[in-house]
Image: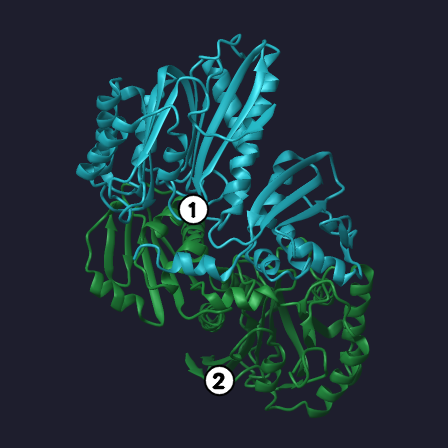
Chain colours: A green, B cyan
Amino acid sequence: MKIIEGGVTAPQGFWAAGVAAGIRKKGKKDVALVYSEVPAATAAVYTINKFKAAPLKVTEEHLTNGMAQGMVINSGIANACMGQQGMDAATKMAEMAAEVLKINSTDVVVASTGLIGAPLPLDTLEIGIKEAAEVLSREGGPSAAEAIMTTDLVKKEITVQLEIGGKTVTIGAMAKGSGMIHPNMATMLGFITTDAAVEVQCLKKILKEAVNATFNMITVDGDTSTNDMVVLMANGMANNPVVTMDNQYYEVFQAAITEISVILAKMIAQDGEGATKLIEVKVSGALSLGDARKAALSISSSSLVKSAIFGEDANWGRIVTALGYSGAEVDPDKVDVYIGDLLMAENGTGLSFDEVKASEILAKQEVIITVDLKLGEFEAKAWGCDLSYDYVKINAAYRT
Amino acid sequence: MKIIEGGVTAPQGFWAAGVAAGIRKKGKKDVALVYSEVPAATAAVYTINKFKAAPLKVTEEHLTNGMAQGMVINSGIANACMGQQGMDAATKMAEMAAEVLKINSTDVVVASTGLIGAPLPLDTLEIGIKEAAEVLSREGGPSAAEAIMTTDLVKKEITVQLEIGGKTVTIGAMAKGSGMIHPNMATMLGFITTDAAVEVQCLKKILKEAVNATFNMITVDGDTSTNDMVVLMANGMANNPVVTMDNQYYEVFQAAITEISVILAKMIAQDGEGATKLIEVKVSGALSLGDARKAALSISSSSLVKSAIFGEDANWGRIVTALGYSGAEVDPDKVDVYIGDLLMAENGTGLSFDEVKASEILAKQEVIITVDLKLGEFEAKAWGCDLSYDYVKINAAYRT
């Protein structure tokens, strides 16, 4: 497996574009189109928020046959909580994309991100979609990746290559997500394209597993949004032997999709609103995978832990506090806590530690917290970021 | 029922004191003693955090007979996550208080709040306890209320009076809690004293119910601490007919304890670290009380809702988002959302609203959010505060 630069147009047969239609502030790209030369097996994972936005519902419907050939995404307006008007707008958005791409509208994936409860400006959007179609190209990945950003500071793209049955398979991806990021797809959009040939049920399983271990293990502020989804399109143009659940290619392809998802997830956490540091929390020795994940997420989500890391304060008591209310099975007299490689508490009891060394560890851009529950064999990682003044600044007046 | 000024020494027979022993920064009061002239029926509710601090365990043991006569509380050091050393320190703390109060150590309630994982300085504490005993008085309530503060900006005390069987009964209370406040007693301490005569099982039930509707419905940062508890001592010196579960006094006394708890809970939320506004969230029309509480807490805990309120931004989309992931039963097409008395969304769909009126509502010190689920008969209130720059400032370097 090789990690290289590139995004959704890196795999064979994918075209993309991103343009500034005027939905966001003047000059900012806000409409993205992605197109596959041939229909692609397509899987998606959606938010668990009960107020699932209209574009997700429309996409879910379009993907009942497991196939798609295009994607249209806008930033600026989420098209959520708009009732029938929102459903109509999302359907219309798919139709507009289908028209310019000359495909069926049921083969279009629709996604939106931005302000909730405001109407999608369909006229502006249409101009954008037409313009995007005109500049659609095999080099358009970075431009599309820009167009899906909202409060993101950096564009998130990555490409992975691997061999399947003697053929080079390329996986490209772009993502957005900054605030409101939490397990289960919180205002996080991920689009993964590949020229691999993959059986569609297998593709669904692979995406689900990858998302659970990666996108669902990042958190910026604990809010799970109405709009998040991760989509994976596989168009088969690499001519590899088809990946199925039963053959030897399954594992290597799963590993590649998980790897690309880890990279995107960490990019998102690192770019969390106001973030100055990436926090990785590793929980080991759990009685179950569910416990390990709950514990890791609880620690990485704690405002007090996040503030302490921002302040470079080795306040490990907040780590055990977050562990204690995580719902995971814990024996308070067994837990070991590390910040970096420095043991802070052993068997649930605080140790005196080297404050100078702790400060050095906490001064780094990436802080690793390790908690060993010493109860079982399961482990999980979660990623988050510190809580800074800028988080508040960004979110105090998002709408205005 | 009459709400008046005063604290834990307002009811007959209660004495208190607060002194600066030197556990916290120079000059800040950090040790409180409370004493009842006669043994009192005593109930307590404890944190659900699995890392329950030593003082809570010792108190739980001391209250197995439902009686206590004194309370000793320190701020500065939480005496949590200290293993056997912590248990020994908490036991010793009770013994030191028992000695100066001339009561049995098993009749002493022990509480601590502050930094986790550091040893209680027993020598300093002993000096403080002795000093407090010397200045113990019937007017010592305010002084004790000061000594239990940590990052609190204001002292939290209140007194309620009511008639039970022709006798005036007084209930006094003090509380602390600022950051780390979340349902189930997160770093929140509440001490309620009363001269009412109440049967002890009845007292336990009354406290439990009051806590569930009040202290467990406030949130500052979503973190549930290792040290929180609420204690209720009833010494019977008002000579009222004993309140029992079966007589007519039960309801009025329950109402009074709930009322005093609501007032304290709102004081705590209002004084949340860095708070500039109190947020009250009322959820009605829920299918169950549990659903109403989950929904109200989810909204009041959302960092995005809290940041929006700080920024006086009528971003109601974040309210439905928090509702959507709360776990409460919700029909997205039925929900109405109000900010103040302004209807922002009806049947789950955004309305155009008067931005000027919204700004006026959001400019107030207290913002009320109302959500009607229109599914059932249950309702609940939760209280929280906005998320400001100062929250981050306070928590980034708490330890140092």
Residue A173 left/right relative to A147: left
Dividing the picture into quadrants, the one containing residue B357 is: bottom right
Report whether mark 2 lies on the same chain as mark 1: no
**Image point (45%, 73%), residue name:** A263
Kindly report which numbered mark, 2 or 1, lies closer to the viewer in this rendering: 1
Considering only vertical position in the picture, is A40 above or below B16?
below
Query: Circle 1 is placed at which residue position?
Result: B152
Considering only vertical position in the picture, is A179 above or below B387?
below
Where is residue A94? Give x, y as percent.
76, 74
The amino acid marked with disc number 1 is: Asp
Question: The disc numbered 2 marks a residue on which chain?
Answer: A
How far apart marks 2 and 1 lie (CA) works out to: 62 Å
Residue B31 left/right relative to A51: left
Q: Is residue B103 visible?
A: yes
The amino acid marked with disc number 2 is: Thr
Query: Circle 2 is placed at which residue position?
Result: A168
**Image point (72%, 83%), residue name:** A21
Q: Nearer the viewer, residue A217 or B141?
A: B141
**Image point (50%, 42%), residue name:** B268
